[in-house]
């Protein structure tokens, strides 16, 4: 078995450039077709709630200033609230609110509550689905019951709804990205196959190969042409 | 000496094909290689395996030398699968095997195919080709033919398969190996070279057959790839 270096690898790619491109195109076409015709588009809508420990509820209203202890306590609460929003009971209530048209674990897999940032009191709740109207409906239903559910679990907490589900965004499939990745995957696969074949090749490949390998006079080379001969000629 | 009745188009002058140029280059290199040898030069041509273009190249090299005005004899010493006569479309009833077995004579068996080129066909396939080629009669025949020709090109069986070529090459200045691009294996070639060293037979050089060449075609696009037997336009 021969060794392989970068120049040989480059030569393999160059010699098989058409196969490389064709394989990439075939892979890309297959993935593009699959994404376009067989995969239903996925949409996302996002709702937002503001959570604090209750100490910030009256800031500005009753003339009180922001207390840093309340602020820190609120920040610590955020992850707990996210965990509450991810609990099974939350989605059992949601399924109940949706008249049991959905299973709770099915709903659970479609929601993704996340704190907006480490120092943010906002929780963004993303909802996914294939029907934009449907995901708006279930997202808004979730938003209706979420504040009460959180308060039932943390008595002193204050939850305000900041954004309801109004817009949806198509998030999948990522056809362009997948197609591009498929092209490169196909090309790389083709290169790997060509490399493996070349490593096991044991025939005299060319004049250059012969001269590099043997110190024997090469009297001449007799060519054949890749191109077809013109018609009507011998 | 018999004359072939065939109209030998491939011997016409004014060849312009790239393949013809390749053979001219091979011919020139051989002339330099054998320049120190005076008198008739006998060259054995073989290949590691079958179907690597050995006979085609033997015929074309012989034709190429004949076009220098040299008297050339092409001997088909492949007594197991002779193909020179098939390629040149001449009869193969009387030839080398008959001469070596004393059934015929060189004068009767040799066929003239052109002004400077003659062919000694293999003749009928004998039951004992190795013995005939290793015999004193073969050695004597070559010595006798040296007096009448400037070049004797001997086409033999693949040396990687049959050892007949080694017996033939002992009577010559050396052996040329025809190897085929993307077909001849490194191991097969190296085994043959080692065998030649062991038998102390000079390896004159190698001809690489079947090289892919696009760059020739655009340059020569007004000419065309010809029949390997060098038909004129």
Image (cartoon, rainbow, N blue to C red):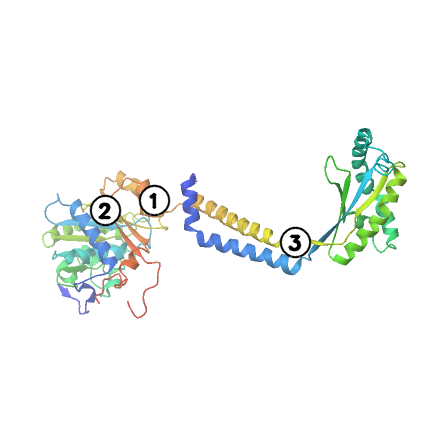
Q: Element type at marker 1?
A: helix
Circle 1 crowding by C-alpha within 10 Å: few under 14, some 14–19, many from 20? few
The chain that hosts pointer 1 is A
Q: Which residue is mark 3?
A: A173
Image coordinates of residue A176 in percent, x first then y, are 59, 53
Image coordinates of residue A163 in percent, x first then y, are 78, 48
Q: Which residue is mark 1?
A: A209
Q: Element type at marker 2?
A: strand
The span from disc 3 to disc 1 (Cα, nearest Å) is 48 Å
Q: Element type at marker 3?
A: loop
Nearest to the eye among marks 2 and 1: give it.
Answer: 1
Quarter of the image with the N terminus of chain B in it: bottom left
Question: Front-most of A139 and A74?
Answer: A74
Decide: marks 2, 3 in contact (CB < 8 A)?
no
Question: Front-most of B66 and A104?
Answer: A104
The chain that hosts pointer 3 is A
Nearest to the eye among marks 2 and 3: give it.
Answer: 3
Question: Front-most of A101 and A210?
Answer: A101
- The residue sitting at the front extreme is A63
> Can the viewer see residue B101?
no
Q: Is residue A66 above or below residue B161?
A: above
- Specify whether A30 is left or right of A113: left
The span from disc 2 to disc 3 (Cα, nearest Å) is 67 Å
Callouts 2 and 1 in the same chain: no
How many tags in the picture? 3
The chain that hosts pointer 2 is B
Image coordinates of residue B135 in percent, x first then y, are 20, 48
Q: Which residue is mark 2?
A: B175
Look at 35% across and 45% down and name the residue there: B188
The span from disc 2 to disc 1 (Cα, nearest Å) is 22 Å
Callouts 2 and 3 in the same chain: no
């Amino acid at each position: 078995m021969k060794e392989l270096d970068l120049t040989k690898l480059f030569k393999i790619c160059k010699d098989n450039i058409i196969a490389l491109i064709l394989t990439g195109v075939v892979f890309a076409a297959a993935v593009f077709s699959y994404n376009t015709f067989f995969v239903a588009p996925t949409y996302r809508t996002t709702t937002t709630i503001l959570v604090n420990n209750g100490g910030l509820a009256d800031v500005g209203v009753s003339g009180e200033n922001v207390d840093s202890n309340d602020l820190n306590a609120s920040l610590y609460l955020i992850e707990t609230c996210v965990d509450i929003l991810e609990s099974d009971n939350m989605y059992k209530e949601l399924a109940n609110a949706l008249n049991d048209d959905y299973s709770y674990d099915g709903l659970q897999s479609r929601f993704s509550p996340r704190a907006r940032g480490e120092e943010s009191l906002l929780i963004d709740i993303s909802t996914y689905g294939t029907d934009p109207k449907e995901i708006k409906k279930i997202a808004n239903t979730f938003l209706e019951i979420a504040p009460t559910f959180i308060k039932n679990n943390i008595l002193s907490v204050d939850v305000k709804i900041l954004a309801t589900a109004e817009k949806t965004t198509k998030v999948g499939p990522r056809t362009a990205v997948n197609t591009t990745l498929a092209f490169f995957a196909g090309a790389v696969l083709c290169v790997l196959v060509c490399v493996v074949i070349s490593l096991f090749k044991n025939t005299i490949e060319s004049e250059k190969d012969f001269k590099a390998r043997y110190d024997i006079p090469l009297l001449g080379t007799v060519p054949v042409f890749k191109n077809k001969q013109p018609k009507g000629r011998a | 000496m018999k004359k072939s009745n065939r109209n030998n188009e491939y011997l016409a002058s004014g060849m312009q094909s790239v393949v013809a140029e390749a053979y001219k280059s091979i011919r020139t290199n051989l002339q330099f290689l054998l320049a120190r040898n005076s008198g008739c030069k006998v060259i054995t041509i073989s290949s590691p395996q079958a179907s690597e273009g050995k006979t085609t190249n033997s015929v074309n090299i012989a034709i190429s030398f004949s076009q220098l005005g040299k008297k050339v004899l092409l001997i088909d010493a492949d007594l197991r699968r002779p193909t020179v006569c098939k390629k040149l479309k001449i009869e193969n009833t009387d030839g080398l095997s008959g001469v070596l077995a004393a059934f015929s004579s060189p004068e009767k068996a040799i066929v003239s195919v052109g002004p400077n080129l003659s062919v000694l066909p293999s003749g009928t396939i004998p039951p004992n080709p190795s013995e005939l080629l290793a015999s004193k009669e073969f050695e004597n025949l070559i010595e006798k033919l040296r007096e009448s020709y400037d070049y004797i090109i001997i086409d033999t069986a693949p040396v990687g398969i049959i050892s007949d070529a080694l017996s033939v090459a002992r009577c010559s200045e050396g052996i040329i190996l025809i190897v085929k691009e993307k077909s001849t294996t490194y191991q097969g070639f190296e085994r043959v070279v080692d065998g030649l060293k062991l038998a102390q037979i000079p390896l004159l050089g190698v001809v690489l057959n079947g090289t892919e060449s696009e760059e020739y075609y655009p340059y020569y696009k007004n000419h065309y790839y010809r029949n390997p037997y060098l038909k004129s336009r």
